[in-house]
């Protein structure tokens, strides 16, 4: 029984992630930026969708450097939540300001049915973790206050708050990542995301070894792609986020399609390579909508 104002379907999505953590079943998450890309990820078999700040920004042809605000991320995340039955994890950057903004973020995203809110310990305005300059950590006590503020306003016990440390991205090392991750769990985080842009998994492996499974660990294996999800699970990872591969696939496919159409002065050579119109109808559930039309 729950007294939560959340609709049961939304609360259930968050509970599913908690159950996977409890069962030590790796949660495989795909980055998406809109309803369509979220549903394609769900149909492929992913367990959850990451509403990526990189993807949501790129979809507006903007860099991921804190240009968009809470309302824009919320609208994109809501479209993804509506499109899928799996849980949506919202990448909420720094929480869009200080601790009261982090609280407002939790309120708004939770009310929209989002299963997990993730905030990271960089100063605002943050830059995407792969940008080579301007990576600056926020003080850990200040970030812990954001986590406390967010947990204070959470209305359902299953909604997850994921604390992301950028210690490794900022060159502060594994020791600092561990210290911060412990502080963040003490402040109420349900899981920690440890981001790394190393070419290999060594620093993540060291983190995991010294962390001793104190709380679930989330990773984003973009640069250390050779480390499989089986190997990650074996090393103690609970959730793996393939944050930007759908976005990059889309860019490559659309670019080669348009180049070919101009080159051949016809779409004939690429027709077999692209999704038929009927496929788009099916993904967007046209037939269901037509049955509703009275
Ligand atoms: C995102 O997808 O927006 C992320 C992951 O935060 S990363 O781009 O690797 O920083
Ligand atoms: Mg992001």
Image (cartoon, rainbow, N blue to C red):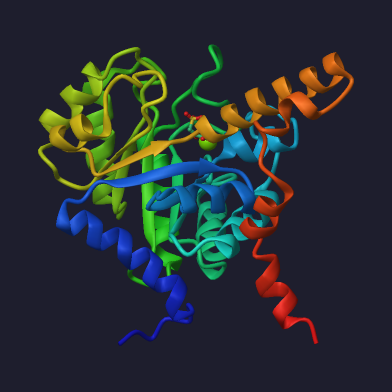
Above or below, comparing residue 202 to residue 293 in the picture: above
Left or right of 81 in this view: 274: right
Q: Residue at x 61, y 36 (%)?
A: 55
Q: Quadrant of the C terminus?
A: bottom right
Left or right of 44 in this view: 195: left
Give the total number of marks visible in the rendering.
0
Q: Which residue lies furthest to the right in this view?
A: 265
Residue 144 visible in image: no
Viewer-side residue, 252 vs 10: 252
From the top left corner, tell me how far across and down residue 228 is, in percent: 27, 28
Above or below, comparing residue 49 to residue 87 in the picture: above
From the top left corner, tell me how far across and down residue 148 is, in percent: 38, 55
Viewer-side residue, 264 vs 118: 264
Residue 162 visible in image: yes
Q: In which quarter of the image is residue 4?
A: bottom left
Viewer-side residue, 163 vs 87: 87
Q: Which residue is drawn at 59% across and 54% down?
A: 77
Q: Residue at x 72, y 82 (%)?
A: 292
Above or below, comparing residue 280 to residue 32 in the picture: below
From the top left corner, tell me how far across and down residue 198 is, in percent: 35, 14
Q: In which quarter of the image is the N terminus?
A: bottom left
Q: In which quarter of the image is residue 270?
A: top right
Q: Residue at x 63, y 31 (%)?
A: 250
């Amino acid at each position: 029984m729950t007294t939560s104002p959340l609709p049961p379907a939304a609360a259930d999505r968050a509970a599913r992630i908690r159950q996977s953590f409890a069962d030590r079943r790796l949660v495989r998450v795909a980055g998406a930026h809109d309803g369509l890309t979220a549903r394609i990820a769900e149909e492929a078999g992913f367990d959850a969708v990451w509403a990526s700040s990189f993807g949501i920004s790129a979809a507006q042809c903007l860099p991921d450097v804190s240009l968009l605000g809470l309302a824009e991320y919320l609208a994109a995340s809501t479209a993804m939540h509506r499109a899928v039955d799996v849980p949506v994890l919202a990448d909420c950057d720094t929480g869009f300001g200080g601790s009261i903004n982090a609280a407002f973020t939790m309120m708004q995203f939770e009310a929209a049915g989002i299963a997990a809110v993730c905030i990271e310990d960089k100063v605002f305005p943050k830059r995407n973790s792969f940008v080579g300059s301007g990576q600056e950590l926020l003080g850990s006590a200040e970030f812990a206050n954001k986590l406390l503020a967010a947990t204070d306003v959470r209305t359902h016990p299953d909604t997850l708050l994921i604390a992301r440390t950028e210690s490794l991205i900022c060159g502060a090392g594994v020791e600092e990542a561990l210290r911060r991750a412990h502080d963040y769990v003490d402040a109420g985080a349900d899981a920690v995301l440890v981001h790394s842009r190393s070419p290999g998994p060594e620093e993540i492996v060291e983190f995991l070894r010294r962390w001793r499974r104190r709380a679930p660990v989330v990773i984003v294996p973009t640069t250390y792609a050779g480390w499989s999800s089986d190997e990650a699970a074996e090393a103690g990872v609970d959730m793996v986020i393939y944050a930007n591969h759908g976005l990059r696939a889309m860019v490559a496919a659309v670019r080669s399609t348009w180049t070919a159409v101009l080159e051949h002065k016809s779409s004939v050579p690429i027709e077999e390579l692209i999704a038929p119109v009927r496929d788009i109808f099916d993904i967007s559930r046209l037939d269901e909508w037509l049955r509703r039309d009275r």
